[in-house]
Image (spheres, helix red, strand yellow):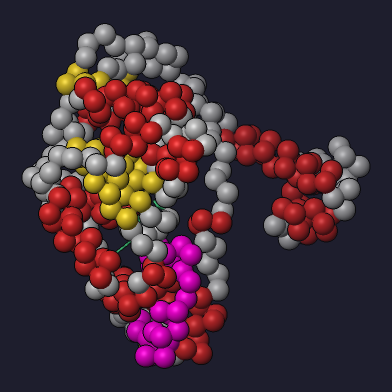
Amino acid sequence: MPARHELDPSSPLARLVGTSKAITDIRAEIEKLADSAASVLVTGPSGSGKDVVAQLLHQRGRRAARPFIALNCAAVAPDLLESEMFGHEAGAFTGAVKARPGRFEAAHGGTLFLDEVGDMATAMQAKLLRALETRVVERVGGMLPIAVDVRVIAATSVDLFAAIDRGDFRCDLLYRLDVIRIEMPGLADRPEDVPLLIRHFAALLPGQPVRFTAAAEDLLMRQPWPGNVRELKNFVERAQAHFPGEIIGAERLPRLLRGFTPAVARPAPPAPEPIPDAGIDLKRILADLEHAYITEALTVSGGAVAATAKLLGLQRTTLIEKMRRLHIGTAGG
Ligand SMILES: Nc1ncnc2c1ncn2[C@@H]1O[C@H](COP(=O)(O)OP(=O)(O)OP(=O)(O)O)[C@@H](O)[C@H]1O
Ligand SMILES: [Mg+2]
């Protein structure tokens, strides 16, 4: 199930912390635009705060008491996206046992946040464009048009203009979404926000907040932070877990800074098949997947166990143990 946050008025307010010119301007922009119903496109690298901006736009506007519904277009299997977005009637397709409203209907009166909008198949883009133009949706297998009043906020971490050039994104849809653009800068472009963000995240954690010497802060401001604010947040959590209440000097940073695998460098996991009503056997599926990858890696490395383990990012002993469990021999079987 993809993430769905429904903010009610009692939910904590999102915060966009920072005193850099970029963040100060964006905060002012949000205040100015919160009451508008115009579509907003939030761009920026992973972890830069696009979700925060979307939530703030909703919370600061006149739709705040109505639902904020998020749909991550990259997290839903392509053939399920239409029914997620527009809903379905009972019996519309195998597995559609009961009728269900889509995210557009759920967001009625409020805000619909379409995350990773660049990941949508072009056929789906056409349907989204029609819904945005007519403000009417039809459930899959349904006959009745349903009028919806939603403010749409879309986010993307990929360059949609490049996607248009490749033929992967519809130009007319981009213009519909890109009425107002908010561009989130990467954290490396606003180093002056780093100390403030550190204090903000440390204060949110339980226990005595961790602190840093001026020299350490200086070093942290010069980090590249490829995972942006999310990476910094993880770093603060790690520092606080190891050294609650302490003042950390620059000499202790190298160890603390290691151990972060940027989310951007990890390939996306394969999209799952739709889950049938009868359910699935996840352990079996994972074992089959392990079997397939290990066999493939063994073939690539000519059956050498050490090289295979390296290819798979496993310890040699872990690989041998897995091969024994999965009945894989080095002779290819
Ligand atoms: N300026 C900020 N002030 C406070 N917290 C922030 C700020 N920017 C980001 N965060 C926090 O950092 C984390 C990552 O931010 P967010 O989820 O908004 O990034 P994103 O741009 O949507 O990333 P992705 O492209 O991976 O979806 C969240 O926990 C968010 O609350
Ligand atoms: Mg996000």
Q: Splitting the image into four quadrants, where does ligand 1 fall?
A: bottom left
Q: Which residue occupies 19% across, 18% down?
A: 146
Q: Is residue 92 left or right of residue 287?
A: left
Q: For residue 142, which quarter of the picture?
A: top left
Residue 231 is one of the magenta-drawn residues:
yes
Residue furthest left in the image? 62
Residue 44 locus on image (x, y percent): 38, 55
Q: Quadrant of the N terminus?
A: top left
Tell me what residue is drawn at x 27 percent, y 24 percent.
131
Magenta span covers which residues? 210-234
Residue at 37% of width from left, 24% of height from top?
Answer: 126
In the image shown, does 328 or 212 lie closer to the viewer?
212
244 versus 53 height, above or below: below
Q: Give the residue furthest to the front.
A: 165
Residue 245 point in image, percent of width and height: 34, 84
One can see residue 151 in this view: yes
| In the image, residue 4 lies in the stretch drawn in magenta | no
Q: Nearer the viewer, residue 188 or 234?
A: 188
Is the C terminus in the top left, top right, bottom left or bottom right quadrant? top right
Foreground residue, 260 or 210?
260
Above/below status of 28 relative to 239: above
Q: Residue furthest top?
A: 143
Residue 154 at what x, y percent from top left? Answer: 31, 42
In the displayed structure, would residue 222 be above or below residue 329?
Answer: below
Residue drawn at 72 percent across, 42 percent down: 293
**Which x, y percent locates residue 237?**
40, 70
Asked whether residue 241 is in view, the answer is no
Q: Main secondary structure of the magenta part?
A: helix
